[in-house]
Image (cartoon, rainbow, N blue to C red):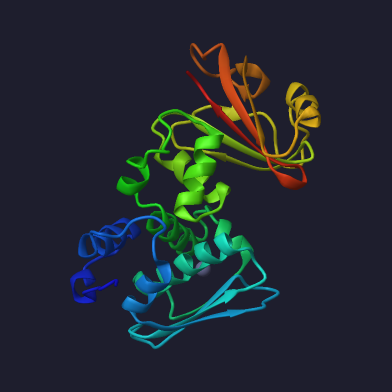
Amino acid sequence: MVKLELVEFADFRSPPEFVSGIFRQNPDLGFPVPLEDIARAAGIFKIRYEKFDAFEGVLRANAEKSRGIIAINSRSWPQRQRFTLGHELGHFLLPKHNCFMECSANDMMSRLRLNPIEVEANEFSAQLLMPESLFTSHPDYPESPDCMALVSLADCCDVSFKACAYRYQDLFRHPLGLIFSQYGEVRSIRRNEALGFWIKVGINDALPNHLGQKIQTMTANSVYRQESATDLWFDTSRATNPPDSVMEETFLQENGYATTLLWFE
Ligand SMILES: [Zn+2]
């Protein structure tokens, strides 16, 4: 059973402080992190699952944020619901976040500094579902990027592959780019802080030819790895001594969705 001494969190400001405080007070917690129990111990007395059209999650709390209710969009798939619960719990616990929040699907993806409250709630959720020390010491945690290892890790954490890939990317100390595509068209691009090169493809662009063609021959839930010329993916015109080649691994999921990892060896 999760127990929280919230009085010890009084001076906390940032997601890492809260997450490490929660695990310090509950050292036996493991994967999958029992999010509903943590929410209840924090003061959320009701978690409702409702069919929403415009929102993924809603928080209603008293002004002191000592008690609250969270509602989650039941139309979303289960791992997304878990991420949303973590996000709303972040709004509930983190200072400066309002006691009344209605969060859309876009808010759940937000990394834009224009929207720091949503970014912070996302960081809180990702860190609570995949705390660094448990995540990086898990036997499935790959030392270098590996889609199938991330699939298995996502399964243990009960999070989506995408959330797991994001977390891995943020913790990876070397350059790592993520390209999400569907039927060969780029849907989103994500870089980590260590990645200093500009990725050439943009949203709605076709994937580079060699990969677009390869994907058409792949079956769902398979992985393709190869070494490519760096300039197929990156604009290195302003870089001094850029690497000649980049490792790319693509995981083709259902319905034409694919995730491509780009890194240097
Ligand atoms: Zn939010």
The answer to which quarter of the image holds residue 76 is bottom right
- Residue located at (49% from left, 56% from top): 158
Horizontal and vertical percent position of residue 134: 33, 48
Which of these two is toward me, 192 or 133?
133
Q: Nearer the viewer, residue 200 or 221?
A: 221
Instruction: Name the residue at 46% across, 50% down.
Output: 156
Residue 105 at x, y percent in the picture = 62, 64
Give x and y (percent) for residue 144. 45, 28
Q: Residue furthest left?
A: 8
Image quadrant assignment for residue 92: bottom left
Q: Is residue 173 above or below residue 68?
A: above
Measured along the vertical axis of the image, is residue 48 above or below residue 120? below
**Is residue 102 something one can see in this rendering?**
no
Residue drawn 37% across the image and 78% down it? 40
If the image is split into quadrants, where does the N terminus sit?
bottom left
Which is more toward the observer, 175 or 27? 27
Q: Kindly identify the residue that appears in the image at 52 percent across and 18 percent down.
A: 239
